[in-house]
Image (spheres, rainbow, N blue to C red):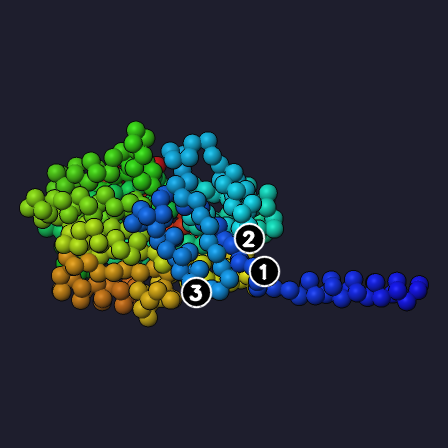
């Protein structure tokens, strides 16, 4: 071979080596990530918590750029599929795409197969656990079970009627375990702190049929809230993505009613009616997003099922805690002290509410005395628990 040919081969090998050791993105180009949100970006709930975390990523990680599509649901975008929207984001340069709803599970899985060169993050799904996920798809969720236990705890400490309402979205394993967690927190406060009989605590879940109101499709959460209050439920815990629970509670207080609410999802949830708010359990997506996006950028992305709990050193630390609970203005001083003791017990393990004896709603055994639920049992909870009123399926 002539010297020129050898030089060409060596040059080619050198170029290949350079490409092999390049970072996952070029420093002079933005790392674009896409966000698909089930609701509007300004819903003061679930989707806004995701949106604000993504905006914070842009500020904190040099070279990142977020593009998004919100209202990804059948009512707002009839006939449009998740793969259709992913195609649009990819065409605009997205190298990683986050889908923020359990309802996107099938679409995210399909899109990840269609775009093996793109990273996918599915929020609240479990395809990694079930083995259905492509290698470029990872799962992320927060252990909101703890936040809901706190919600139930403050609700039971506050109620004057012994009747707690739970404004539920649709029924699936996620919502069953979250409502059950709130009930367990309420039962603990009622029986262990207030020393009242368990039978005197009424806990009812009313499901509206989706994560937020779709006129003509779901039950109207405003009407469900009013029905709760008209029937003596004086504390309502929200499980839906939007703010109807705290808004109606605030309206009723202005009319003279002694009612309270515990909103959901978003750190600013109490802002709608501070005088009615006992506190808000919320998601902080910044720690999870930061780790995953950085790994995609530097080429260390690893498929995982991440179910992230609070940072018990400071559950409201935005840098470190994926789950937080902000105390509301309506929560009394004594209740705050009792809540802090409860949080300490959850943190050190001396309080484990998913321990037996516990039965399912139909009376069958969930956990025998001395048994503690595994993560899998909690994640896949098939029914509500005994002592709860409301549909399990």
**Where residue 314 sits: x, y (%)?**
31, 68
Q: Quadrant of residue 173?
A: top left
* Contact? badges 3 and 1 (CB < 8 Å): no
Determine the residue positioned at 57% across, 64% down: 27
Separation of marks 3 and 2 at Cα, in angstroms:
18 Å
Determine the residue positioned at 61% across, 48% down: 116
* Contact? badges 1 and 2 (CB < 8 Å): yes
Q: Residues within 10 Å of mark 1 (few under 14, many from 20)?
A: some
Q: Is residue 212 left or right of residue 199?
A: right
> Residue 336, labelled with which disc?
none
* Contact? badges 3 and 2 (CB < 8 Å): no
**Where residue 386 sits: x, y (%)?**
27, 45
Q: Which residue is mark 2?
A: 95
Q: Camera-side residue: 180 or 151?
A: 151
**Where residue 305 sits: x, y (%)?**
48, 55
Residue 145 visible (yes or no): no
Q: Earlier in the sequence, mark 3 or mark 2?
A: 3
Q: Quadrant of residue 17?
A: bottom right
Q: Camera-side residue: 243 or 363?
A: 243
Separation of marks 1 and 2 at Cα, in angstroms:
9 Å
Outermost residue, bottom direction? 313
Q: Earlier in the sequence, mark 3 or mark 1?
A: 1
> Residue 25, labelled with which disc?
1
Instruction: Determine the secondary structure under disc 3.
Output: helix
Determine the residue positioned at 25% across, 53% down: 269
**Where residue 13 sits: x, y (%)?**
78, 64
Q: Residues within 10 Å of mark 2 (few under 14, many from 20)?
A: many
Q: Is residue 247 left or right of residue 377?
A: left
Q: Which residue is mark 3?
A: 60
Q: Is residue 293 left or right of residue 232?
A: right
Q: Count the marks: how many?
A: 3
Outermost residue, left direction? 256
């Amino acid at each position: 071979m002539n010297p020129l040919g050898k030089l060409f081969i060596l040059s080619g090998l050198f170029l290949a080596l350079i490409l092999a050791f390049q970072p996952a993105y070029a420093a002079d180009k933005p790392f674009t990530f896409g966000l698909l949100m089930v609701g509007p970006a300004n819903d003061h709930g679930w989707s806004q918590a995701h949106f604000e975390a993504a905006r914070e990523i842009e500020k904190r990680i040099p070279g990142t750029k977020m593009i998004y599509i919100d209202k990804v649901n059948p009512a707002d975008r009839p006939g449009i599929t998740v793969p259709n929207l992913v195609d649009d984001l990819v065409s605009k340069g997205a190298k990683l795409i986050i889908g923020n709803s359990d309802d996107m599970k099938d679409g995210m899985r399909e899109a990840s197969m269609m775009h093996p060169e793109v990273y996918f993050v599915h929020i609240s799904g479990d395809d990694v656990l079930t083995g259905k996920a492509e290698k470029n798809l990872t799962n992320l969720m927060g252990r909101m079970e703890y936040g809901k236990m706190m919600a139930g705890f403050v609700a039971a400490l506050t109620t004057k009627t012994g009747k707690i309402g739970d404004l539920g979205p649709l029924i699936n394993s996620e919502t069953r375990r979250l409502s059950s967690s709130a009930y367990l927190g309420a039962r603990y406060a009622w029986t262990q702190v207030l020393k009242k009989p368990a039978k005197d605590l009424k806990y009812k879940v009313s499901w509206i049929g989706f994560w937020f109101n779709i006129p003509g499709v779901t039950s109207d959460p405003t009407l469900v809230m009013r029905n709760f209050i008209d029937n003596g439920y004086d504390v309502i815990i929200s499980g839906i993505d939007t703010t109807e629970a705290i808004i109606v509670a605030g309206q009723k207080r202005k009319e003279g009613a002694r009612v309270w609410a515990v909103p959901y999802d978003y750190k600013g949830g109490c802002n709608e009616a501070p005088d009615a708010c006992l506190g808000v359990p919320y998601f902080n997506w910044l720690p999870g997003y930061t780790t995953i996006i950085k790994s995609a950028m530097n080429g260390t992305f690893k498929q995982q099922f991440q179910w992230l709990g609070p940072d018990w050193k400071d559950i409201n630390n935005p840098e470190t805690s994926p789950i937080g609970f902000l105390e509301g203005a309506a929560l009394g001083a004594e209740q705050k002290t009792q809540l802090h003791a409860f949080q300490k017990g959850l943190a050190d393990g001396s309080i484990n509410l998913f321990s037996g004896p516990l039965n399912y709603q139909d009376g069958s055994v969930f956990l025998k005395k001395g048994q503690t639920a595994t993560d899998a049992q909690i994640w896949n909870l098939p029914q509500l628990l005994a002592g709860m009123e409301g549909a399990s399926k």
